[in-house]
Image (spheres, helix red, strand yellow):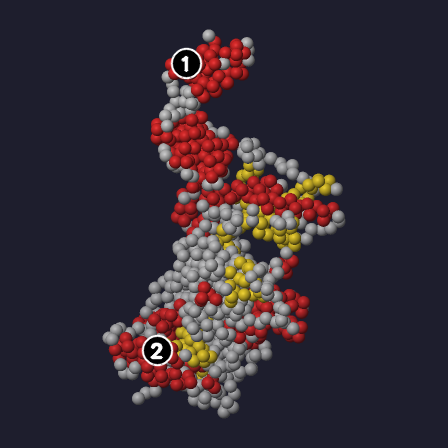
């Protein structure tokens, strides 16, 4: 019998539906993998009973002859940013210590309704601020990947959804939720050789998802391949009246729409993404990606997104500004940690609680955000950044007159070693240079594995699509996936 | 624009994050590094450009005026570090 | 338009006071501005709180249509510009009554732009002294929760029931120049809000409160530095706070000091304002557009409904009462000062017109007089409001009709009204059963007159000798002899005749 943990979303669902194996068997197998992978530190909390209960419910449904939903019997990992009833949700921060939501996020509820169970809460960068998972208050996630130099240096799984990426590539779960504010699904997917899609802003409800930057935050699926992403995205998406920015649109059946035939499609190669000093292996995989898409029938055209270089600085004004306000609610009054020094007044309690509860990167961003919104600086920083953001969105709108999707690298390098970038915030921020423009414009974008670099580490290719055209993105991703033939997986050392 | 430790202190106070003098001093160069980097935005000609409001065209929906929530005091107070008699407790505030 | 002559006499001469008000009015709605929790007053602590109001992680605001609608209608009622495109901004500060760490408000693009409110400074003659107070804007925002300081020795308690309730902030121009003008403005604004139905105006329950901006200057000078006295919750306190604060500022300036732009608190027990230093360092609110909400765009259908659903407003109603119903300016002003009174009066008017088969204009004066003297007097005695009047509009109209058609006299009508209040019986029945109908039988009247004149021969002599003031005495005696039922016109006429014989 095949190892059930080698199966992805579609195979598990199909097998459960067909009765090839039970959902309980699947959950049990993944629970075991989770339990023995503590060395990766991918999961903050294990919830094997949740996975089993959901599996049993699916098995009972099948026994009763009921139709099984689109993710029947698929156990998943849940990024710690999602609130789920009765399970601690901390956004990997001390400040939310002990916080057990009494409510279920819309996205997690939709996943349970689709037949999923929860294996546990996944580690992440604290409040989703980071690109290496090193800002978690509960320790780094160690990527299951290692360089082929025999050095065994611990590598970053990417971030902020680093627990999700590590868990999927290590076969601890077939799929996991991610959230993407400025690359937090795509960059970790690229680092670990898996797929992940950030849908159009507004597709997935933000209700019950701990906020980082409201105008950018989007949940999305991370899984082993494009089909699995399509299935899970359908399960996660849909209009939510509780989120004012939710899109009131029907959810397409993306899985049914999958096609790697790109005849008549044009793929744009944004010339500004080919930056000075670009890593040669990244440039090479990008070229290869273009060849694969041409092979799939697409026409390759060079296009221009002139404001690309300003995307990252604009992002590092807008996201911290929103975060400085979104994170004001963590004050030790209604939930989470409270630090009350002797004789402290209310405002002292706030300052002490927040000093102890937030990690250094979170504090840095709150401080930057507070500064750019403060009196006298608002227009120079925030208003200017939102205007530049409008120009970046306009660049994309103009590019769609010439092509259907864009192809670019996901990240400027393969996974780096833990600690390598943590001294220089800006060097770390530059990891998201290719990911952030699509975030600022609210566009759907995904990363699929393209191949391995000379060190044996995965490299990702990014496809960016028109608003609401997740299908076009998934199809181009599928065309690459079929041609890249990426089957590499990390050897089990944990 | 270059910030000094006094500005960093003021920002920390506005953000309600207690910082030691050493932490403030350490943050000054970081702060200036990041601000210096984002200030390249000033180069962009934004004449006639409206700031971004909604990334995807969408309009604000309004809900009907119906009571659909509340009466969940147990949920509201469930995670409170100091809840008493149905209230949240905070250190005494002198107004 | 009238120039205010209110001045503060200082040691260095006269000072003029400049006043602007920011009125926070609770929007009448069932649910909160951004959550589905109830707004009712007086619930158990934290019972009317949703997860959104408590700012739980991941909670998001969704605006309540009715709150927007009521703010738009209020704007229309003061002739203001309605902004079809507006936005919500976050005002960031830390306080225990503010769970999100920010208040959702509107700074950059308010829902309602410039408008105006006309105030009258002479209640007896409302058209004589009027002044237009400019309104800068009306925006919609969340109320904060409530802190209680006296329940525990070392802790304050937080109740979030009010957290998220919708407020309109109505910001005036600094157009007022005296406490009386500010008082008149506040009263007028309250009247308009209650007519529109957008706020119940209940200052005791905190539905309406004012931040009072005061500065002083020598007449003709530039505006001085202003202070803001927060959360003053009655018309009387607003006037007292202005008077106190203006005098304080004059004292400071005349003793060589300067006025600090600051937030102050009015203490009604001591009748003084004092600085709220606790709020001083929080003045950098870092406003920015709330990224959880999209711009608010209003379409024609929405605006048309808002307009169509506006009632006749107090000024228009008052003028119509004067011109179409022929009421005195004073009566028209009193009847229209409260929406409830006007509504009741119009119901009474309709019943009077029906009972007497006459147009409303012909029965209005009598109806207004009866309401303002008889009914108001009774309500005052009973401590009741017009909405729980023990006498219905139809019953009042029946009584008024009996006077109008001469069935009873005005004097008898007062008696009948008292009986109505006691027994709840209709006027007609009371008059019938107690035989209170007025007598127009000249035979009976003449007989009564003859007896009165015979019994008072000495007074008749005096009258005939020129003491004509005694006529009233004869009328009274005759009416008394007839138990008040004599038709007053006939009694007069017959008496004149008898005395001239």
> Which image quadrant: the N terminus of chain A?
bottom left
SS of the residue under disc 1: helix
The image's mark for residue B26 is none
* Number of the front mark, 1 or 2: 1
Q: Is residue A232 visible?
A: yes
For disc 2, the marked residue is A53
Q: Is residue B52 visible?
A: no
Decide which of A228, C178 is in the foreground and name it: C178
Residue at image position (51%, 66%) is B84
Question: Which x, y percent locates residue A215?
Answer: 48, 64
* Residue found farthest to the front: C455
SS of the residue under disc 2: helix
Decide which of C213, C230 is in the foreground and name it: C230
Identify the chain of the residue marked 2, using the numbered disc in the image: A
Within 10 Å of disc 2 (Cα), the crowding (few <14, some 14-19, many 20+) is: some
The image's mark for residue C446 is 1
* Residue found farthest to the left: A65
Residue at image position (57%, 60%) is C150
Decide which of C207, B59 is in the foreground and name it: C207
Question: Which x, y percent locates residue A29?
Answer: 36, 85
């Amino acid at each position: 019998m095949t190892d059930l943990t080698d199966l992805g979303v579609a195979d598990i669902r199909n097998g459960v539906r067909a009765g090839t194996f039970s959902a309980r068997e699947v959950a049990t197998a993944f629970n075991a993998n989770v339990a023995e992978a503590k060395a990766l530190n991918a999961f903050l909390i294990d919830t094997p009973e949740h996975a089993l209960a959901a599996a049993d419910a699916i098995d009972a449904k099948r026994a009763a002859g009921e139709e099984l939903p689109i993710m029947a019997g698929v156990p998943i990992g849940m990024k710690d940013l999602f609130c789920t009833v009765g399970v601690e949700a901390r956004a990997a921060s001390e400040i939310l210590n002990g916080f057990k939501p009494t409510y279920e996020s819309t996205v997690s509820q939709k996943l349970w309704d689709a037949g999923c169970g929860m294996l546990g809460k996944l580690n992440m960068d604290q409040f989703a601020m980071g690109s290496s998972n090193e800002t978690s208050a509960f320790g780094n996630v160690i990527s299951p990947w290692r360089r082929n130099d025999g050095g065994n240096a611990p590598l970053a799984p990417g971030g902020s959804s680093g627990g999700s990426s590590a868990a999927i590539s290590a076969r601890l779960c077939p799929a996991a939720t991610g959230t993407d504010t400025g690359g937090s699904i795509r960059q970790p997917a690229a680092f670990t050789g898996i797929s992940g899609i950030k849908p159009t802003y507004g597709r997935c409800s933000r209700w019950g998802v701990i906020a980082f930057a409201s105008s950018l935050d989007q949940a999305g699926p991370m899984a082993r391949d494009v089909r699995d992403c399509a299935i899970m995205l359908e399960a996660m998406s849909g209009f939510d009246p509780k989120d004012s920015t939710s899109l009131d649109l029907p959810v397409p059946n993306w899985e049914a729409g999958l096609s790697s035939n790109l005849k008549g499609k044009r793929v744009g190669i944004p010339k500004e993404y080919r930056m000075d000093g670009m890593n040669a292996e990244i440039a090479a995989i990008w070229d290869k990606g273009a060849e694969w898409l041409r092979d799939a029938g697409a026409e390759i055209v060079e296009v221009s997104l002139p404001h690309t270089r300003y995307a990252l600085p604009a992002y590092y004004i807008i996201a911290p500004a929103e975060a400085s306000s979104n994170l004001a609610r963590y004050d030790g009054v209604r939930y989470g940690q409270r630090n009350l020094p002797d004789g402290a007044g209310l405002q002292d309690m706030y300052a002490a609680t927040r000093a102890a509860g937030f990690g250094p990167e979170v504090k840095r961003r709150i401080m930057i955000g507070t500064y750019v919104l403060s009196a006298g600086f608002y227009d120079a920083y925030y208003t200017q950044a939102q205007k530049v953001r409008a120009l970046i969105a306009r660049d994309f709108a103009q590019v769609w007159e010439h092509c259907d999707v864009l192809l670019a690298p996901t990240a400027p390098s393969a996974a780096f070693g833990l600690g390598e970038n943590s001294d220089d915030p800006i060097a770390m921020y530059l990891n998201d240079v290719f990911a952030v423009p699509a975030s600022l414009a609210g566009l759907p974008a995904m990363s699929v594995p393209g191949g391995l670099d000379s060190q044996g580490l995965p490299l990702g290719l990014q496809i960016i699509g028109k608003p609401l055209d997740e299908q076009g993105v998934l199809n181009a991703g599928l065309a690459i996936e079929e041609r890249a033939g990426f089957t590499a997986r990390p050897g089990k050392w944990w | 624009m270059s910030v000094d430790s006094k500005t960093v202190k003021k920002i920390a106070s506005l953000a309600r994050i207690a910082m030691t003098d050493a932490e403030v001093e350490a943050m000054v160069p970081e702060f200036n590094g990041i601000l210096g980097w984002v200030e390249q935005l000033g180069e962009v000609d934004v004449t006639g450009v409206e700031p971004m409001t909604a990334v995807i065209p969408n309009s604000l929906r309004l809900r009907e005026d119906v009571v659909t929530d509340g009466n969940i005091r147990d949920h509201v107070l469930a995670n409170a570090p100091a809840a008493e008699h149905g209230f949240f407790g905070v250190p005494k505030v002198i107004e | 338009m009238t120039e205010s002559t209110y001045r503060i006499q200082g040691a260095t001469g006269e000072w003029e006071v400049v006043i602007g008000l920011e009125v926070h009015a609770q929007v009448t709605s069932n649910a909160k501005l951004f959550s589905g929790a109830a707004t009712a007053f007086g619930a158990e602590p934290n019972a009317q709180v949703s997860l959104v109001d408590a700012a739980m992680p991941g909670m998001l605001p969704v605006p309540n249509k009715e709150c927007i609608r009521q703010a738009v209608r209020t704007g229309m009622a003061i002739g203001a510009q309605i902004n079809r495109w507006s936005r919500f901004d976050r005002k960031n500060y830390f306080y225990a009554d503010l769970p999100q760490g920010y208040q959702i408000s509107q700074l950059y693009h308010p829902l309602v732009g410039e408008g105006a409110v006309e105030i009258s400074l002479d209640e007896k003659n409302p058209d004589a002294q009027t002044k237009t107070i400019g309104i800068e804007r009306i925006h919609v925002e969340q109320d904060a929760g409530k802190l209680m300081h006296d329940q525990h020795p070392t802790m304050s308690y937080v109740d979030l029931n009010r957290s998220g309730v919708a407020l309109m902030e109505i910001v005036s121009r600094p157009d007022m120049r005296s406490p009386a003008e500010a008082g008149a403005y506040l009263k007028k604004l309250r009247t308009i809000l209650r007519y529109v139905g957008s706020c119940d105006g209940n200052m005791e329950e905190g539905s309406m409160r004012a931040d009072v901006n005061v500065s002083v200057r020598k007449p003709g000078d530039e505006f001085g530095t202003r202070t803001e006295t927060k959360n003053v919750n009655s018309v009387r306190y607003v006037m007292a706070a202005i008077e106190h604060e203006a005098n304080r500022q004059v004292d400071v300036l005349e003793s060589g000091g300067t006025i600090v732009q600051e937030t102050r608190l009015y203490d009604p027990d001591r009748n003084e304002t004092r600085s709220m230093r606790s709020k001083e360092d929080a003045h950098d609110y870092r406003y920015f557009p709330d990224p959880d909400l999209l711009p608010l765009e209003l379409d024609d259908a929405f605006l048309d409904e808002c307009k169509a659903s506006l009632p006749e407003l107090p000024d228009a109603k008052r003028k119509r009462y004067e011109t179409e119903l022929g009421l005195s300016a004073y009566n028209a002003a009193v009847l229209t000062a409260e929406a409830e009174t006007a509504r009741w009066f119009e119901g009474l008017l309709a019943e009077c017109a029906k009972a007497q088969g006459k147009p409303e204009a012909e029965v209005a004066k009598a109806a207004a007089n009866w309401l303002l003297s008889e009914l108001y007097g009774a309500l005052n005695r009973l401590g009741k409001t017009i909405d729980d009047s023990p006498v219905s509009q139809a019953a009042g109209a029946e009584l008024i009709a009996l006077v109008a058609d001469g069935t009873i006299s005005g004097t008898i009508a007062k008696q009948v009204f008292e009986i109505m209040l006691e027994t709840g019986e209709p006027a007609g029945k009371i008059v019938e059963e107690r035989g209170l109908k007025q007598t127009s039988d000249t035979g009976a009247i003449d007989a009564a007159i003859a007896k009165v004149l015979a019994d008072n021969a000495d007074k008749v002599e005096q009258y005939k000798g020129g003491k004509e003031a005694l006529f009233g005495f004869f009328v009274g005696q005759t009416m008394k002899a007839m138990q008040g039922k004599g038709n007053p016109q006939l009694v007069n006429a017959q008496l004149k005749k008898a005395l001239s014989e």
